[in-house]
Amino acid sequence: MNASRITTPFTADSTAAEITAGVRLTGRHAVVTGASSGIGVETARALASAGAEVTLTVRDIEAGEKTAEDIRSATGGGPVHVARLDLSDQGSIAAFVTAWNTPLDILINNAGVAAVPESRTPEGWELHFATNHLGHFALATGLHRALAAAGRARVVSLSSNAHLHAPMVFDDIGFQRRPYDRMLAYGESKTATALFAVEAHRRWSGDGITVNAANPGSVVTNLGRHLTAEDVAQLPAYNYTTAEHGAATSVLLATWPELDGAGGRYFEYCNEALPFTPDKPTQGVAAHALDSEAAARLWQVSLDMLATARR
């Protein structure tokens, strides 16, 4: 945990729209992954309403265009574009990065998969890790020059309280030797997204890039479509919230002026999270998600995996 915990005037009851009230993002470019449903839509809506030029990255262009039109009609704010991006497909990521030709002020790594049956990419990578972490890792590192060119860029990496009991198992990231556990696989991928923020900020803060991890809280979206009744029965007693509230922490990390340069942290409910304690089983951040040695190791493992895939 960082020495001085960051708190804000906002709370779990704040919405994304409340975060951007009075904020002007005119002239700034933002990319939101997974922006055709759930939290991604509300994140994009709030950024556009504040005047940002927002690109929604989606797998389904038709769904993305419908979302973009809804945002344009509702906000009358900044321009909204749609681009295809499949984070489980390295070719799709490379194409998006190659096509991007302007400074990038805000990157919200929002898209994800959860609790899917055992699935692997063509490279043989386990799907949760490949999509939630490795896809966003390839995207962010590919866009690093664009982020640096913006001068004061923000990167937001979405994590989850599923990370709490799922430290990285570096000896078997892909569940090649362990029995596959889809909930554990999801949790480890969300530990990875938190560790990404730690190491990315360490590496990129000198370029004016601030990177933090956000836990949006427990939001009922289609992310949970693979959960069975038995899965739900085994989950802790979460306090569920709406997409408008869930997007607030991401939007805060992307826009709040006081966060310039303050990165490598994990936020929930619009404030930096406290360390996890067993008496609050669905809140806080585990030490393994902020471990600088694990973060540096994961960065190198990720580079190695991507390099192997390109051969």
Image (cartoon, rainbow, N blue to C red):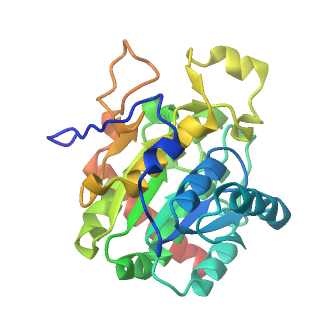
Query: Is 289 situated above or below 261?
Result: above
Relative to residue 109, is residue 96 drawn left or right?
right
**Which residue in the rendered view is the most extreme toward the left?**
3
Which one is nearer the viewer's eye here, 182 or 44?
A: 44
201 is higher (above) or lower (below) than 112 = below
> In the shown orientation, is residue 103 left or right of residue 245?
left
Q: Position of residue 238 (x, y in %)?
A: 56, 19
Q: Residue 118: in sight, yes or no? A: yes
Residue 179 seen in the current view: no
Q: Residue furthest top?
A: 279
Residue 172 pos. (x, y %): 51, 47
Q: Position of residue 61 (x, y in %)?
A: 81, 67
Q: Look at the picture and state if 207 lies above or below 276.
A: below
The residue under the point 41% across, 75% down is: 147
- The count of marks equals 0
Residue nearest the observer in this picture, 305 or 283: 283
In the image, taking residue 108 as reference, residue 80 lies left or right, namely: right
Q: Identify the residue at horizontal 42%, vertical 38% (top origin).
A: 167
Residue lying farthest to the right in this orientation: 62
Where in the figure is residue 211, as x and y percent of width and height?
A: 36, 58
Quadrant housing residue 114: top right
Query: Which image quadrant: the N terminus?
Result: top left
Please give the name of the residue rendered at 26% of the width and 62% of the height, measured from the top-left corner: 202
Q: Quadrant of residue 87?
A: bottom right
Is 116 located above or below residue 305 in the figure? above
Residue 5's image quarter? top left
Q: Quadrant of the C terminus?
A: bottom right
